[in-house]
Image (spheres, coloured by chain):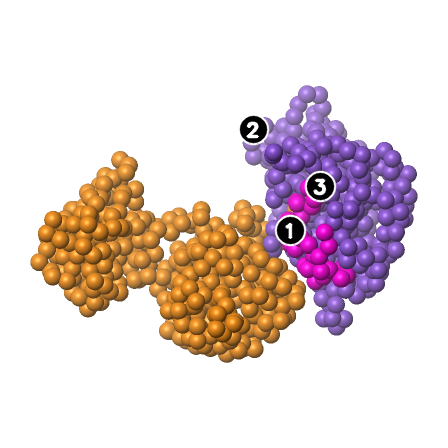
Chain colours: A orange, B purple
Amino acid sequence: MANFELISSIARQTSSKIVFLVVDGLGGLRHDEIGMTELEAASTPNLDRLARTGTTGLTIPVEHGVTPGSGPGHLALFGYDPFEHQIGRGILEALGLEMPVGANSIAGRGNYCLLDHDGKIIDRRAGRLSTEQNLKLTEILSKIEVDGAKITIKAGKEHRVAIVFDPIEDSKFSDKINDSDPQKTNVPPNKVKAATKNAAQTASVIQGFLEKAGEVLKGSPEANGIILRGFSSKPKIPQMKKIYKLNPVCIASYPMYRGLSQMLGMKIIPTGDTINDQLVTLKDNWDNHDFFFVHYKPTDAAGEDGNFTEKVSALENLDKEIPTILGLDPDVLVIAGDHSTPSVLAGHSWHPVPFVIRSSTSESGQTEKFTEREARKGALGTIQATDLMALALAHSGKLDKFGA
Amino acid sequence: MANFELISSIARQTSSKIVFLVVDGLGGLRHDEIGMTELEAASTPNLDRLARTGTTGLTIPVEHGVTPGSGPGHLALFGYDPFEHQIGRGILEALGLEMPVGANSIAGRGNYCLLDHDGKIIDRRAGRLSTEQNLKLTEILSKIEVDGAKITIKAGKEHRVAIVFDPIEDSKFSDKINDSDPQKTNVPPNKVKAATKNAAQTASVIQGFLEKAGEVLKGSPEANGIILRGFSSKPKIPQMKKIYKLNPVCIASYPMYRGLSQMLGMKIIPTGDTINDQLVTLKDNWDNHDFFFVHYKPTDAAGEDGNFTEKVSALENLDKEIPTILGLDPDVLVIAGDHSTPSVLAGHSWHPVPFVIRSSTSESGQTEKFTEREARKGALGTIQATDLMALALAHSGKLDKFGA
């Protein structure tokens, strides 16, 4: 596990440039009929060339057997111990919907649900309500006012909402409160209560909101209740600028990754929806920064959909863009994944993820192609994802010698 | 990371013998024109034979991406966490010049420098003063006396000196003081001040010395000032005898490695300048010890000089001596490096370093030659350097079973 104190003590600012390309859900598993993983099936001549000459290996995202969500997966890649630095679900959901989250905010994620006459939950997702109906209900709920708090609520997809509570004036909120969502049916929603003295006001504000929401939604046939969970506040996270002496930027199409990057102190640069847009943004900002996090989502999306062919295409499309990145002549190019998303599992997994580091100080191994099996034969074997950041800094000449 | 408490609880004294050969700066990188690393280019039939039958792998000296100095690199090989056990620069410099350093000593490293009329630094190294001039000035400075301290000063190469301050009588010194060397020009040297109450006397002694030195050097045209940095005291380090139940010796030609070994409780045996001399010393002392640290420097020196051919020769010269070591029939022979010193970088680097363990309990891998790439295919893959010592003990039958 990378040692922040050590790395921070030897990090120095230099003009060298690092492109850190995160291929979301990069790793895969063998498809029984095809007999290959997505990376093995894909035609990726550019990635393969990098793999033959660069420093390759596999990363363990969190630890063996642990499947990370997107938050921990990315935190680890940027060198943060994902167990020590946990980001609450409510915060991640709010960031994903581009809601402003302040130092004093408490965010929660919620579902519209269906209740019976006794107030017991019949369906926790209200039959996966349509997003249109969600938007209508959320419009109504956003008019609710509760003393002592500013409340912001935003519709997600289907039955999902995120909600942010900000204290008014000098008071402080706390996330030491329980979920109102009991995570099961045939019971009523929980009352939100404070687990500590400091959380009393927060619990009363949120319970107050829920009671008003209950009254407003009462008549609504498609969803007559709302349940909240994952209350959390923004964690205090060491800033990349301070630890690594970097001037880092995030070039990501999805809001959640931008929100997460902002928490680490990256500058967020607006960009478009495609990798092509992102690489134009990369080029436009080349002179002003030394660390460029570029996030590629289609691989994870296809994996989550259980679509092997689509994930293969996503990898091939990415491969075509590699020459554009190399054209900028970065001192270091890291290509890594936050976790595996094997399409045969249609979800994230714990399996180690291939990576390649391309620099003038790369040591090549026996890797012939950019795949899970070949990466194992790389110069570094299997490492912790949290070690990748120090390697990127070392390869770019941004770490001084430790000790005499 | 090796667990001292665990290893210490199962270590036992036996008559088996371990030769621990540290090849300084062993690892290298591929030379672009030659297309090989130094180890790949060298003809090393004896090392290759060991690599085919022994336990091979690569060590990470400190952690991924971290380039160690000689101190941390060696501490790790002997099983000490190099982050936890840090040895100050002043202490290492003094040890390197064979100056006696006691439990209460404060050591600093220094430069002769050039000051302008206002006392501002023009050149921190006084134009890399000749060693002869250095010796003359140091002779003069060694006559300075300051109340409360015994002062020992010794010339290094060119502009470098080391200086050791020992308290007189019962008083204690502290290294919680700042450098007088500001590490930049066009400013005067810093006054040495105490950062804590306990350091007040130390600061006043050293500042007193510096003021007298300033007066003495005033007229000297080639170097009219001296600046000191890296003040440190001898760290308290667990002794190898106690942790490992060993009776260890150091056979090294360079003073710094002898000094470091002495701090770990090794006995220092005088030896000559060549590996041949060292192996004669090894043979002469074979019956009296069970752990022999033999240090081989030419590989690092050639790497630091950026001399690929010279490093290849240094490896080939070492290879010729391997039969002499095997002739003593050690129970365990470990060949490892404290860090890589690729001649293409002309300096230390973070890249993992090959090792081989030869014993009757070695498990062979798929390694065909003693090189970086082949070592990766060894039985142990990539491990922490701090794990090597426990492996050496295990292979020599010096570790009991842990638990029932």
Q: Amino acid at mark 3?
A: Ala
Which comes sooner in the sequence, label 3 or label 1? 1
Q: Which residue is mark 1?
A: B383
Whether residue B345 is visible here, answered yes or no, is no
Q: Is residue B374 magenta?
A: yes
State the residue at coordinates (66%, 45%): B387
Percent position of residue A73, x then y: 45, 57
> Does B373 sit left or right of A399 as displayed?
right
Q: Amino acid at mark 1?
A: Ile
Which comes sooner in the sequence, label 2 or label 3? 2
Percent position of residue A258, x then y: 38, 62
State the residue at coordinates (76%, 71%): B34
Corner quadrant of residue A277:
bottom left
Q: Quadrant of the N terminus of chain B?
A: top right
Does the residue at mark 3 contact the one at mark 1 (Cβ under 8 Å)?
Answer: no
Q: Which residue is mark 2?
A: B197
Q: Is residue B290 above or below residue A103?
A: above
What is the spatial separation of the Cα atoms under label 2 and label 1, in whole angstroms? 43 Å
- Mark nearest the camera among 3 and 1 is 3
Nearer to us in this view, B73 or B19: B19
Percent position of residue A133, x then y: 17, 66
Q: Which residues are magenta?
A: B363-391
Nearer to us in this view, A314 or A295: A314
